[in-house]
Image (cartoon, rainbow, N blue to C red):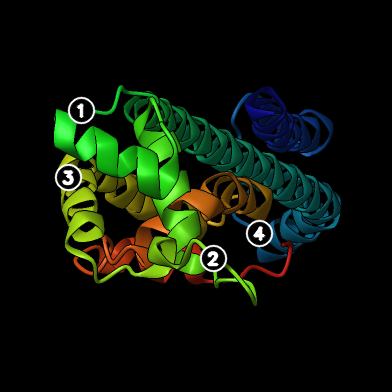
Amino acid sequence: MNRWLRWLLLIGALAAVITQFMYWWKFSHGFLNLSDSQEVWGQFGDYVGGVLNPIFSSLAFSGLVVTIVLQARQIDMMNRQSDMAKQQSELEIQRVQSTVADRIDGLLAAKVHVDSVQHQQLAFFAGSPMSVSEMVSALGTAATAKPEPGETNWLQWLWNDTAAEGLRNSLEAQTIPVRLEFESLAWMLSQYETLGGSPIVTAFYRRRYNAQLVWLDALGLLKQNVEVLAFFRRSSVSE
């Protein structure tokens, strides 16, 4: 479009030169023999104004149109660049979210470490879970459940029992890394929401880790992880 502006300027300059040349060629008496008559100069002014004013007005209007088109294209280009930058930022955030989620999954899949006494207690209270995730599920389910009427194995529900508390403490130590990763994920998802990210993504992570977080919270292991509770308990319209 800059080429069109240059052409408009060139046409305007040529129009001015040609107009004056035609006047001198038609009415002058010899080369550069200028008249000292006011009437002649008045006619010259009327001629130049009558010929050039419409041309310059047309060129000015054309230049205005070209300028508006240029500005519109620049604004459109800036919007596209902004959208591309936003998409790139969202993709980068999602990549980090996926990396953190993979670390959480790896930590939850890690093998449970308990001594022989705790192993017997674990078998009594929660079966024989092999991974941290299974242990969280087993103990968390027992912590959130209520005994059915006529339940004979009533010891399973006494979570103030020393053995149960010992298992909870063991689980607390083994879930420190995963709870820290949950904090990172909650912070990252909060930033993603603030930037206008897709609610489907945040809803997916809330649903994905809802059970694990409910169990950890029931066991009292998220009291220090306020940001995790604040984010994952917050409901979304899309959910």
Return the residue found at the far bottom. 149
Report helix, strand or loop for mark 2: loop
* Residue 28 locus on image (x, y percent): 73, 35
State the separation of the CA atoms marked 4 and 1: 113 Å
The reply to whether callout 1 and callout 3 are in contact (CB within 8 Å) is yes
44 or 194: nearer the viewer: 194
Location of residue 184 with respect to 99 vertically, above or below: below
Asked whether the beta carbons under mark 1 and mark 2 sit within 8 Å of each other, the answer is no
Comes first in the chain, label 3 or label 4: 4
Mark 1 = which residue?
Answer: 113
User: What amino acid is found at the position of numbered circle 3 in the picture?
Assistant: Ser
Residue type beneath disc 2: Thr
Which tag is nearer the camera, tag 1 or tag 2?
A: 2
Give the mark nearer the N terminus: 1 vs 3: 1
Is 143 located above or below residue 65 in the figure? below
Q: Earlier in the sequence, mark 2 or mark 4?
A: 4
Rendered residue at 23%/45% (across/down)? 171
Q: In the image, is 26 to the left or to the right of 228?
A: right
Q: Secondary structure at mark 3?
A: helix
Check the picture and name the quadrant holding the N terminus: top right
Tag 1 secondary structure: loop
* Inter-mark Cα distance, 3 to 4: 112 Å
Q: Residues within 10 Å of mark 2 (few under 14, many from 20)?
A: few
Tell me the mark number nearer the camera, choosing from 4 and 1: 1
As drawn, the label of residue 170 is 3
For the residues labelled 1 and 3, the Cα–Cα distance comes to 8 Å
**Which residue was labeled with disc 2?**
152
Disc with the residue nearer the chain's start (1 vs 2): 1
Question: What residue do we see at 20% from left, 39% from top?
Answer: 118
Going by the numbered disc 4, the residue's amino acid type is: Ser
Q: Earlier in the sequence, mark 3 or mark 2?
A: 2
